[in-house]
Image: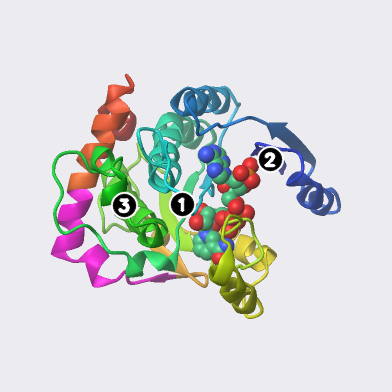
Amino acid sequence: MFVEYWGRTHEHFTRAGWRCYFDPTISCFCVKIFNISSGGFGYISVKAFANRVNHLPQLDVLINNAGISAEKFSLVYGTERTLGVNVIGTFLLSLLVLPKLRETAKKFNTTPHMTFVGSAMHSTANYPKKFDGDFFTWSCEKENVNLNNQYALSKYIQLLLVNKLASHIDPLPSTTSKESNKIIINSLDPCFCGTTGLFRDVSGGKRIFLKIFNLFSRTPEKGSRLIVGAAAAGRETHGGWLRAGEVRETVEMVRGVEGVERGERVWRDLVGRVEGLGVGVGGLVEG
Ligand SMILES: NC(=O)c1ccc[n+]([C@@H]2O[C@H](COP(=O)([O-])OP(=O)(O)OC[C@H]3O[C@@H](n4cnc5c(N)ncnc54)[C@H](OP(=O)(O)O)[C@@H]3O)[C@@H](O)[C@H]2O)c1
């Protein structure tokens, strides 16, 4: 097995690198650093990164792990930052590398995976009762954003969009894949892993609460095993939501009529954004 590890800095790779070095099933481990910025050049750097990925000989798995929980209001990708990174950046990259996953499936007769790292927190999100126009533009206004809700909301929207993407790639429910689209798209909750960098900016009482809560949390290694499990799971997980390694029924606000309508609306807004960058979503999704 050949593993390429992409990330923004060297410091994350030391432990993972040593583990792979001692794993007999891994013949080559390669670290590549690429600065996916979320600043003013965010779109450009995601497109440039996708371009690099699309020049790899093959792509078997895309794990969409990048995520933040911003403590202060700011904008990236033309929307509030948590929403920008967890939703816009994530889906822009995913859409851009879809053709590579498809090409890999055909060329090597394999079933590539696209796995999104979600969060069970999505079920606690407060979705705005009313908003005008494009959801991401609406979220640019500070008074429209509640930062205590924003992480959960971004993961809720992410899950609605994963469902939309999965159903475009291959209609749900289905047990066999379309011959032209042998890709498995799923998402999961890695469960609470308190010692990661996710809440790095939290301070005050919230920080103390988290420190106590961390005592009962999983290690990041256990969380990462769940992620790898989802990225290697079978066709039955396509369009599915996994928790503790198993496909689970989503909550009513995701699977019900309301969730479907909201999914349609944010999908339209996402497509508008991505197409505004000159990327034809229809062609990428339909293949
Ligand atoms: N920890 C938990 O309890 C928990 C629970 C449920 C779900 N999750 C989800 O698990 C995923 C990983 O989170 P984590 O807990 O492992 O936190 P983490 O240690 O902070 O990892 C997040 C990763 O995202 C990267 N990232 C942040 N902004 C980015 C951007 N604009 N472009 C590219 N990469 C970016 C970070 O890179 P840098 O370090 O270079 O900034 C970091 O490697 C997230 O999606 C999170 O929502 C975590």
Say which label, 2 or 3, has the lower sequence index: 2
Q: Return the residue at label 1.
A: 116
How far apart marks 3 and 1 lie (CA) works out to 24 Å
Q: Residue at x 39, y 63 (%)?
A: 241
Q: Return the residue at label 3.
A: 145
**Magenta segment: does it hold 262?**
yes
Task: Classify residue 268 by image quadrant.
Answer: top left
Q: Amino acid at mark 1?
A: Phe
At label 2, counting other C-alpha atoms closer than 10 Å, the crowd grade (few under 14, some 14-19, many 20 or more) is: some
Q: Secondary structure at mark 3?
A: loop
How far apart marks 2 and 3 lie (CA) works out to 34 Å
Q: Position of residue 69 (x, y in %)?
A: 49, 54
Left or right: residue 191 versus residue 92 is right
Q: Position of residue 12 (x, y in %)?
A: 73, 46
Q: Nearer the viewer, mark 2 or mark 3?
A: 3
Q: Return the residue at label 2.
A: 5
Say which label, 2 or 1, has the lower sequence index: 2
Q: Is mark 1 within 8 Å of ligand 1?
A: no
- Give the magenta part as a residue range: 247-264
Residue sitting nearer the eye, 283 or 110: 283
What quarter of the picture does the C terminus occupy? top left
Is the residue under label 1 in contact with that under label 2 (CB below 8 Å)? no
How far apart marks 2 and 1 lie (CA) works out to 17 Å
Q: Secondary structure at mark 1?
A: strand
Is the residue under label 3 in contact with that under label 2 (CB below 8 Å)? no
Say which label, 3 or 1, has the lower sequence index: 1
Q: Residue at x 62, y 30 (%)?
A: 35
Q: Amino acid at mark 3?
A: Val
Q: Position of residue 169 (x, y in %)?
A: 31, 42
